Image: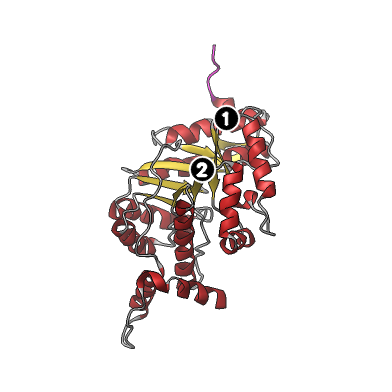
Amino acid sequence: MRVVVATVLRFRTYTGARSITSRQELGALLSDLDDFSVPTELPTPYLGPLPPYIPQLVRRVNFPERLPASVAITLGEFVAKSGSFRGGVNAVERLRARGAEEVILVGTSLDPQLEAAWQRPQQLLEGLGAAGIKTVLGPAFSLYTGRPPIERMANRARNLSMYARIIQGGFDAVPAVGFVDARDAEHVAGWIASRGLHTVFVDLQSAESRRSWAHVRAAIPLLVHRGGLARLVVNGIVHPDRIRELATLAKPADLVVTNAGAAHTARLGEDYFRDGRGLLVKRKTRERPERVFWNLAHYYHRVTAEPSETYLPLSMQPMML
């Protein structure tokens, strides 16, 4: 808890403390603290070109032999727990050797790597420069459901502080804002609009349960419409039907999806099939991993613009003459 309190106090210089009376309700107090911890002014997010789907690759995935023009590597792959970026720089070089023209850093990871980046921001910038990475999504410190609200607020403030530093270091970046439920989303949308953040990054890695997805359904439209978003970048959603629904929820904003779903599913020798209930479920496939990867990647790419499309595994697609 000492770390969280120190983090909140770190942002005192941005807005100054507000007077808090003993009669304020808890909700009002937390709202006051959130404004207190988030920087008043933030640099303009990157609005340059991004592909609709950015596949994330890990070092142990050696397919496809020829990569898409734009791929991603996560912060967890780029920085070691020790804080070293050498392995990450080498990983980016190997991706480029397989044809990737652009490697984007997705700022998600386990806490030790995120903390290493937070404590060594200059080394992170040096690592990005050494790897030739130009665009960063995030970083995204965790906003866990069920954790104390002040912890979520502190991590949200750290996300935006690191985003500002990356921009000031000469790189392109999209700020990670995050939300926990529709109530959080409404509040976050307010300062998205007030700070002109037309493009934001949301990490939804932990939104796979029905309850979490219900929050997503309520929160995404709030972020888009009340925040005045032109583009929404989402990490972590993998299920093809969820991606299709997400594309509808994000309208009229442009949607960009990044995940390790195509590579991870193919690496496991699996694909998505309809079961007797009509649901898409994972099952083993005889198709080669590279073919499954491209089939999923192409679907993710297309469905962001055409949410009506339904995913078809390779075995169910008509044969090309």
Of residues 118 and 137, which is closer to you in this image? Answer: 118
Q: Residue furthest top?
A: 321
- For the point 34% across and 57% down, the residue is 192
Span colored in magenta: 317-321
Please name the colour scheme applied to the rendered image: secondary structure
Q: Is residue 311 magenta?
A: no
Q: Mark on residue 294? A: 1
Q: Secondary structure at mark 2?
A: loop
Residue type at the position of mark 1: Trp
- The mark closer to the camera, 1 or 2, is 2
Q: Secondary structure at mark 1?
A: helix
The x, y position of residue 78, in whole percent, is 63, 49
- For the point 46% across and 61% down, the residue is 161
Q: Quadrant of the N terminus?
A: bottom right
- For the point 39% across and 74% down, the residue is 33
Residue 203 in sight = no
Q: Mark on residue 134? A: 2
Q: Residues within 10 Å of mark 2 (few under 14, many from 20)?
A: some
Please determine whether, in this image, residue 77 is positioned above or below residue 97.
below
Please determine whether, in this image, residue 310 is positioned above or below residue 28.
above
Of residues 234 and 67, which is closer to you in this image? Answer: 67
The x, y position of residue 244, in whole percent, is 43, 40
Residue type at the position of mark 2: Lys
